[in-house]
Amino acid sequence: MRAQPTASHFINGAYVEDTEGREIECIYPATGEVVAKLHSATPAIIEQALASAKEGQKIWAAMSGTERGRVLRRAALIIEERNHELSVLETLDTGKPMSETLYVDATSGREALEYFGGLAGSVTGEHIQLGQDWVYTVREPLGVCVGIGAWNYPTQIACWKGAPALACGNAMIFKPSETTPICALKVAEILHEAGLPAGVYNVVQGYGDVGAALVTDARVDKVSLTGSVPTGRKVYAAAAEGMKHVTMELGGKSPMIVFDDADIEDAVSGAILGNFYSSGQVCSNGTRVFVQKGIKKAFLKRLKERTEQAVMGDPMDEATNFGPMVSANQMNIVLGYIDKGVDEGAKLITGGKMAQRDGFFIEPTIFADVTDDMTIAREEIFGPVMAVLDFDDEDEVIARANDTEFGLAAGVFTNDLTRAHRVSQAFEAGTCYINTYNLAPVEAPFGGSKASGVGRENSKEAINHYSQVKSVYVGMGPVEAPF
Ligand code: NDP
């Protein structure tokens, strides 16, 4: 299988190569096979991207919002037409099964382009009357935005950052994770096919050093990172040096609380979606599942039965619904956490091992009797490892759910209406769920509080994070001065 792109980078409306850059091998996680070889950006490539973004942004910002929106919506239609081809690439890039990528990845990118394409014409300021004087505000683009992506949702992240940035009249330079370098190139190609002026959406490949070079360049006005908390701290600090705008979409260790009165099948579905979808490589996963003692036994029984029905196999086979880890490195990190879970006394209910096949597969793994101090209950694992913890009452579980540095997401399953809302109000998290889990529609804000991030992606909120307000005071009378 091959997924070799035309060249490593997409700059100024065209594919660009520079073989001087360090090699990046794109490995298909289901087999370990190298499916593409690319090159990290050299300083010359980074310079080309910055210069073209700076120029492209002026042309783009001079167009009306409606014209910009039309380009984004045209790109959305092309993505829809090419969904199958893009889904195959996403599967080769990440190893996620086609049963996911056909319905989620390009689809979610397309929806971001449709949504922000629709909003682009309505990004406006306001009028403030002050007696005979008045003020008007202008919502302006920020300029050149840098997007830095994680490896779990390469198409989605490229679009979630690109669509609002472009809708507001910015240019973007996107650096994918070197683990999944392919999909963002297709996003750039399609945007240009849809009529985007050259230089407005560029993709450069590279390791962390390329991201760092972009973040510190004086021509860059905003940085949007999807990544881990430690990387977020570094990137936020580097951006602060240049007083740049930031959006930080970082990691989590989110709680999911299941009360005695919950519908058990729905709660089990939520726990499965919130731990095993994309083999657990989802930032908002509810990896601490707090189950009230009265239903613990019944919950664990159904959870184990249903988890053992997962179909692990060739991700290209649409019957497969559980794929590999993205890389050997990530597989080893996750196996290390499973060992810690066992060593620290958690009870292994199912899974816990590598699968007996090629590629980086780990069985979906459930631990019960997990306590708050165990490593698997405190650190983000980013793999298919669910920790089930017991609790007695509401006050206790809320305090324990919030006792973490993270604040990305949180969920509650209960049939008590007032309790559902009371618990949601008490959660220290940016994205909360009642009787469902892990849905992220483009219409709703998405992002974290506490160490999980700054700013919000998606929804009208994202417009505020990719634009700034200028206020213009208009004097209508004589100017009075003290002397
Ligand atoms: P990393 O934090 O390791 O990397 C994220 C990106 O930052 C990569 O492209 C990386 O490049 C780049 N990078 C690393 N160091 C620097 C630096 N000093 N300056 C600029 N860029 C840098 O995350 P992963 O790719 O491993 O992704 C997993 C993490 O992402 C998890 O913690 C997960 O929770 C989080 N995540 C958050 C989401 C959210 O929306 N909140 C969604 C998805 C994931 P390179 O890979 O080349 O090192």
Image (cartoon, grey):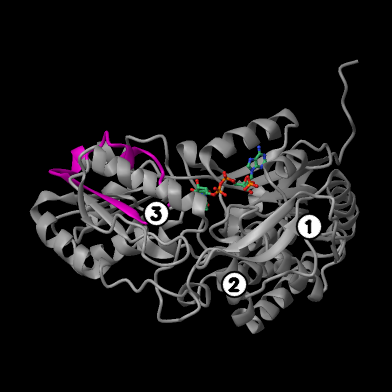
Rendering coords of residue 315 (x, y %): 48, 74
Q: Earlier in the sequence, mark 1 or mark 3?
A: 1
Q: Residue at x 73, y 32 (%)?
A: 243
Q: Which mark is residue 106?
A: 2
The secondary structure type at the circle numbered 1 is: loop
Q: What separation in Å lies between label 2 and label 1 (alpha carbons)?
A: 23 Å
Q: What separation in Å lies between label 1 and label 3 (alpha carbons)?
A: 33 Å
Rendering coords of residue 426 (x, y %): 31, 42
> How packed is label 2: few (under 14 Cα within 10 Å), some, or many (20 or more)?
many
Q: Residue at x 65, y 48 (%)?
A: 465
The residue beneath circle 3 is 285
Determine whether 60 is above or below 206 in the image.
below
The residue beneath circle 1 is 169
Can residue 297 be seen from the camera position used here? yes
> How packed is label 1: few (under 14 Cα within 10 Å), some, or many (20 or more)?
many
The secondary structure type at the circle numbered 3 is: loop
| Residue type at the position of mark 1 | Gly
From the viewer's side, name the closer residue of 166 and 132: 166
> How packed is label 3: few (under 14 Cα within 10 Å), some, or many (20 or more)?
many
Contact between labelled residues 3 and 1, with CB atoms less than 8 Å apart: no
Question: Which region is colored magenta?
Answer: 371-396
| Quadrant including the N terminus | bottom right
